[in-house]
Image: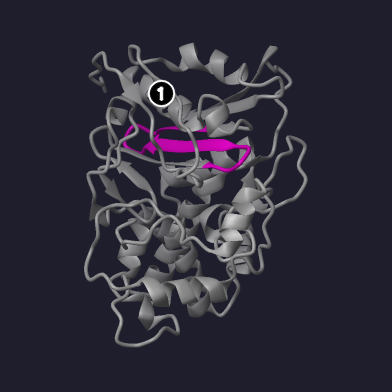
Amino acid sequence: MKLNRRFIKWGLATNVMLSAFITVPSFAQDVPTFDSLIEQAVNASDDAVNTVGYIDQGQSEFQVFTKEGIDESKPIHAYEVGSITKTFTGTLVARAVEEGLLNIDDSISEYLNLPEDTDYPTIRQLLTHTSGYPTFFENEIIIDNLTQGANPYQDVSREIMLNEIAENSHKEGEQPYQYSNFNAGVLGLVLESIYGESYAVLLENYIKEDLQLGTTHLFEEETPLGNNWCWSKETDAYVPAGALISNIEDMLSYLDLQLSEANAEIQASHDPLSEVNATSGDNGELGIRIDAVAYQWMLNQEEDIIWHDGGTGGYTSYIGFNKAEGVGVVVLSNVAMDQGIPSNLLGSLLLMKKLEAL
């Protein structure tokens, strides 16, 4: 499969948890390559550690890149994966649909205790970022967290989120694509209502029992690479948007589950739910297209790539794959997007390179 490229000037604007606050690097040059940028990525800081893995025709491999070069000992580092958490949330929604517990075209008011006589978005709109909700609603907690340089979403409770839904849901029908962490938080509330369990319990049970991912988990205050965001996984309403920690072994296993469509809900989670045509600028040339959205997965329909990325205050991440060709890539980095080369750029370039070679 050959992909057409042309020379462009480009700037990168992507969907990370703090997209409203991060200054994204921009370049005025020919389309870069993975090889040309990985050296820049590991030189972003003395402690930069980029773990890059792939699956190609059933074979998996990974490398650990540092300032000193490739670490041949292949240490398994824990990383915050940020908004890749949303794909797990979307899969839980797909499972609820498969079990007949939820209809994605229902209003969220069918599942949440909200005031009547107000227009609320549907589950489909939350999944596809067409609800009209911004990435968050400003409140004193978020502003205070930002002022302190902390996780902006820490301590925003379910009650606060429900009040914000009630006060800000007055638009009828599908709205233009607007990437939103708030959407994922509301999906978490819906899942809790359906199953009568906290989102944290639902997700961690699903990860361990169904996906068999042994080390992926919600929030840990201290990991060896450091600079973690703090969460209260039992009370924070934004946890479904980005609180997971994982490593390359588990993320490659998760990638393999996607490529094989290991169960009904994973298969369903890849189905396009809304055509959004939301590719920013020249990002399409880099494989970072958003032509449509599935169950939180972004769809590049030109190259048949399904992907998502993530970013927290100290990490970026990327997972992307082409099911037909059996090729996928994972990139995990402990460098924030505004400090270096983001994982979504590295991952997309590597995936495009592998697809070009087929």
Task: Look at the picture and state if 294 lies above or below 65.
Answer: below
Seen from the viewer's position, the closer of residues 12 and 242 is: 12
Q: Position of residue 129 (x, y in %)?
A: 34, 56
Side of 354 where 3 appears, left or right: left
Q: Say if the magenta span includes residue 329.
A: yes
Seen from the viewer's position, the closer of residues 87 and 219 is: 219
Residue drawn at x 46%, y 31% is: 24
Q: Quadrant of the C terminus?
A: top left
Question: Looking at the magenta stretch, what is its main secondary structure?
Answer: strand
Dividing the picture into quadrants, the one containing residue 183 is bottom left
Q: Say if the magenta span includes residue 298.
A: no
Instruction: Spot the residue most to the bottom.
Output: 116
Q: Position of residue 44 (x, y in %)?
A: 61, 20
How many marks the image carries: the answer is 1
Q: From where the camera sits, is residue 205 visible?
A: yes
Side of 317 where 9 appears, left or right: left
Q: From where the camera sits, is residue 213 visible?
A: no
Q: Quadrant of the N terminus?
A: top left
Disc 1 residue type (three-letter): Ser
Q: Position of residue 142 (x, y in %)?
A: 57, 58
Q: How is the image coloured?
A: one colour
Q: Position of residue 323 (x, y in %)?
A: 35, 39
Residue receiving disc 1: 26
Q: Which segment is the magenta one?
A: 311-331
Crowding at dot 1, Cα within 10 Å, few <14 / some 14-19 / many 20+, comes out as few
**Secondary structure type for disc 1:** strand
Residue drawn at x 61%, y 30% is: 335
